[in-house]
Image (spheres, grey):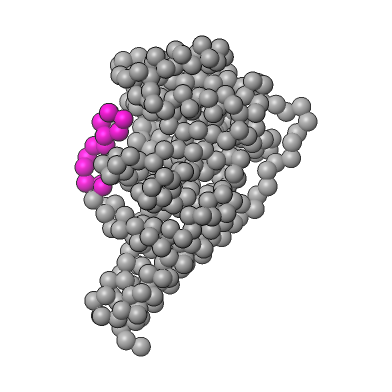
Amino acid sequence: MPLFAIIVLSGCAVYALRVLLFIFGARRERGRPLPTLREGYQPYVSVIVPARNEEANIAPCVRSIMACRGVRDRCELIVVNDRSTDGTAAVLKELCGEFPGLIVHNTAAVEVEANLKGKPRALHEGILRSQGEILLMTDADCTVEPDWIEYSRRLYHDPATAMVASFTVIEPQKIFDTLQALEWMFNHTMASAGVGLRQPLGCFGNNLSIRRSLYDELGGFAGIPFSVTEDLALLQAVARSGRQIRYPCHAGLKVATLPAENWMTFIRQHQRWAKGGQALGWRATIFVISSAAIWLAAITALASGAWIFLLGVLAFRILSDTLLLWPSLRELGFRRLAPWLLLAVPFFMLLELVIPFFLLPRSVKWKGQVFR
């Protein structure tokens, strides 16, 4: 067998091993049922929403939460206005008139604690003012499902459950949105698989919850070193404590977010994710090696002029990623996006090439703030 063919097949084999591992982990996590309801167990729930310069988005977010079943039964909503310089405060004032139970907290102008900067600070201040036994978190540019609170509460009927992450989706309106929607689905599926494999790989803070008792035990965000991906930092802290984490793929638990509006916002978002992802250590290294293996296979086929092999590598990558994503697309009602994987998977591959360059800047700019 020619050397180029050995390299191509070896690269595909390495990637296939990764995909099979993730498929196993995702299936394992999906196979864990919702807990049986415990009679008389109705924990108080606090929903925390940090908002910085979100005048255009905060009203739909608040209304979707207030429309949830069970929101008026042992539940509170706290929106943290994090030093907004736009009309967010005025919109929140109007919403307080519409929903008398809405709690708004305004953060002070100065940040004083090293671990409490940006979003972690806003979340922590909101949590300090909450009463809930269960803390639910989402973002101001998100809307939630009508059963989001009740399904989240139900997962904590299992006394062992300490933290729950779930899927965030994008309802695409154009091709750029569709690529982002599939990437979010891809990232969530791998993160859920990581929980199934008992390896915390990530989560998204716009669909996250934790028991208050554990949050306090960890010292909250004040007790966790600052990270531009505060959700991953919290997930890792919970994992180190040895507590149980759930990452269900369930339509009733999904949250919808907005896509990046343009390429600059998209790049800054991925720069932040890449910086935070360095905390994964050897797990990130293994992921990079497996991605590099499929790239090596494609480059070797191209350099050898073996066009059939090159097409085979691309077809193999598309098929592998489709097999991984299909159960999530089906469960969350996005089967219509499957054909777009023909375009999205090559897009993922290009992203894998440029991500190392996102790590070059020493600082991250997000929401008008600069973090190191």
Q: Residue 133: which quarter of the image?
A: top right
- Residue at image position (60%, 55%) is 28
Q: Residue furthest bottom?
A: 1
**The residue stretch that appears in magenta:** 358-370
Does residue 363 belong to the magenta stretch?
yes
Q: Is residue 55 left or right of residue 144?
A: left
Does residue 178 belong to the magenta stretch?
no
Q: Position of residue 121 (x, y in %)?
A: 39, 24
Q: Residue 310: which quarter of the image?
A: bottom left
- Residue at image position (53%, 25%) is 63
- Residue at image position (46%, 67%) is 319
- Residue at image position (35%, 80%) is 308
For the question of whether residue 92 can be seen, the reply is: yes
Which quarter of the figure is the N terminus placed in? Answer: bottom left
Residues 216 and 307: in front is 307
Q: Position of residue 38 (x, y in %)?
A: 75, 33
Residues 99 and 79: in front is 99
Which quarter of the figure is the C terminus placed in? Answer: top left
Above or below, 206 against 283 in this view is above
For the question of whether residue 222 can be seen, the reply is: no
Q: Position of residue 336 (x, y in %)?
A: 51, 55
Q: Residue furthest front?
A: 173
Q: Residue furthest right?
A: 39
Above or below, 185 against 109 in this view is below
